[in-house]
Amino acid sequence: MDSKVCVVIPTYNEAENLPDIVGSLLGLGLPRLQIVIVDDASPDGTGAIADELAAPYSDRIHVLHRPSKQGIGPAYVEGFKAAVALQPDVLVQMDADLSHQPTTILDMLGCLETADVVVGSRYVDGGSVDMGWNWARRALSRYGNAYTRLVGGVRVRDASSGFKAFRRNVVDSLPLDSLQCKGFGFQAEVTMACQRLNFTLIEQPIDFVDRKKGDSKISWGIVWEALWRLPLIRINHFISRRSRDYPKHREN
Ligand SMILES: Nc1nc2c(ncn2[C@@H]2O[C@H](COP(=O)(O)OP(=O)(O)OP(=O)(O)O)[C@@H](O)[C@H]2O)c(=O)[nH]1
Ligand SMILES: [Mg+2]
């Protein structure tokens, strides 16, 4: 496990969760771990907490302060760019709210020996969603996922997973400045871009647990954005198949 791993975490009002997730990541025993925290001027002071956490680890923890809440998509784009500049072997994206278990990263690193991208998946054998989800939440997630797979042509079972690990060359190839989704549609958009670039994706089962602290940022606005934007992105992919946005198609 001597890969240089960079974990990118977007935060908005995660003051109660950030110390725990950073502590868990540092405890993974990855000697070359880097962490990039991307905070959108959280009113609860998450940015200042991030700075405090980073102070003793200035060579390992990097904090990006953005001026206002602009959505998880743009936050990840900025975080991915900062991560790539650190020249990691592997880049991981995950939520700050501990819904994604840091220890899964160790399994993901193993999977990256045979794949370019590993998607943490609730909907493959061995994966699960929180036991406390009621039927409405389960239905929304299931049907939302089925819709995303259908309209986006997404071939992984958990199309909207926000827990992924990429080989660095994958992120180098992604057209970061062309990604459009501001909300959680970003997760499917990145998966679609990886497929389009012919990278190999595999799914690692995860147990998704609901956040214990802080509030979800999911809103109807970002659900709506995913509903209309993903089909348009797919159509655009068809139209611009030979677009210069995607000059680095892998040949395999
Ligand atoms: N920088 C930044 N981070 C955000 C923004 N919106 C959400 N996040 C972070 O993105 C991650 C996912 O957000 P959540 O609110 O947990 O949403 P979710 O995990 O998709 O939905 P739940 O299952 O309801 O928790 C968390 O780490 C949030 O703090 C944003 O506008 N800017
Ligand atoms: Mg969450």
Image (spheres, grey):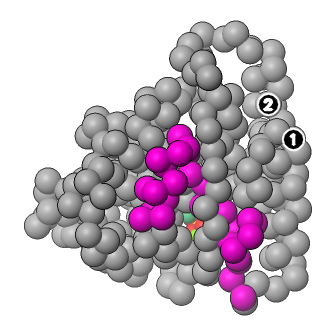
Left or right: 174, with 38 as reference point: right
In contact (CB < 8 Å): disc 1 and disc 2: yes
Q: Where does residue 124 sit, x and y in percent of width and height?
A: 74, 65
Residue type highlighted by circle 1: Val
Dividing the image into 4 quarters, which one contains the N terminus?
Answer: bottom left
Left or right: 242, with 93 as reference point: right
Residue carrying label 1? 151
Q: Which residue is at a point 82% across and 75% down the rendered structure image?
A: 138
Left or right: 58, with 87 as reference point: left
Q: Is 78 colored magenta in this rendering?
A: no
Q: Nearer the viewer, residue 83 or 169?
A: 169
User: Cα distance, mark 1 to mark 2?
Assistant: 7 Å
Please provide the residue range marked out in magenta.
Answer: 105-131
Q: Is residue 52 above or below residue 160?
A: below
Label 1 Cα neighbours within 10 Å, binned few <14 / some 14-19 / many ≥20: some
Residue carrying label 2? 234
Q: Is residue 138 above or below residue 248?
A: below
Q: Is 117 colored magenta in this rendering?
A: yes
Q: Which residue is at a point 43% across and 71% down the rendered structure image?
A: 102
Q: Where does residue 128 sit, x and y in percent of width and height?
A: 70, 76
Q: Nearer the viewer, residue 191 or 113?
A: 113
Q: Where does residue 196 sit, x and y in percent of width and height?
A: 68, 28
- Disc ID at residue 46: none
